Image: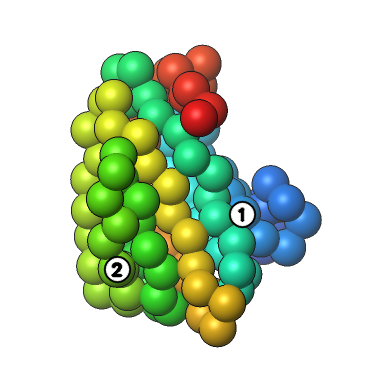
Amino acid sequence: MEMVRESEKSFRNGDWGIKYLFRGPRLDWGVVFLKPGTCMGAHYHREVEETFFILEGKGILRINEAEIPVEGGVAFRVEPGERHDLCTGEDSSLKGIFIKVPYCPEDKVDC
């Protein structure tokens, strides 16, 4: 059994971005918080699938060439090889959770 407190973990960009709660041995699991006017960062994975559940706020999922509006209560899964980015507009923040499986930290390719 492993337990963490979110308050003891840090966002990648200080007070926003990606925050990992669990890393390995079989999955990555964490929180994403995007301030108004920010993006997670376009990338894809060679073998890893990534699932998101939006808890609150609104944003745009950029998946390959499409832009899909997302909001609290929406879940989506991104397949390996699909280029994706999650962004907010200038007037909305977004908070959600993500799960990546299998655990393979070197699998991410920035676009």
Disc 1 packing (10 Å; few <14; some 14–19; many ≥20): some
Residue at horizontal 77 percent and vertical 56 percent from the top? 14
Query: What residue sits 32% from the left and 74% below the top?
Result: 71
Q: Is residue 73 left or right of residue 87?
A: left
The amino acid beneath tag 2 is Pro
| Furthest-right residue in this view | 14
Check disc 1 and report the residue beneath it.
Answer: 17
- Residue 48 visible within the image: yes
Nearest the camera: 25 or 32? 32
Q: Position of residue 20 (x, y in %)?
A: 55, 44
Q: Position of residue 26 (x, y in %)?
A: 36, 25
Q: Identify whether 46 is placed above or below 96.
A: above
Give the SS element for disc 1. Answer: strand
Task: Pinpoint residue 10: horizontal percent, then vertical percent.
Answer: 70, 52
Would you call the spot at circle 2 few (<14 residues within 10 Å), some (14-19), or many (20 or more)?
Answer: few
Give the side of residue 48 with respect to residue 9, left or right: left
Identify the residue at image location x=30%, y=39%. Answer: 64
Q: What is the quadrant of the N terminus in the image?
A: top left
| Colour scheme employed for the rendering of this structure | rainbow
103 vs 44, nearest the viewer: 44
Give, as a three-letter code, the residue at label 1.
Gly
Q: Which residue in the protein does label 2 denote?
A: 69
Task: Judge by depth and name the residue closer to the eye, 83 or 54.
Answer: 83
The number of callouts visible is 2
Marks 1,2: beta carbons within 8 A: no
Foreground: 78 or 11?
78
Q: Where 71 sits versus 78, above or below?
A: below
Q: Secondary structure at mark 2?
A: strand
Name the residue at 46% across, 33% down. Answer: 43
Vertical arrangement, residue 28 with respect to residue 32, above or below: above
Q: CA distance from mark 1 to mark 2?
A: 19 Å
Residue 93 horizontal/vertical position (percent): 53, 75
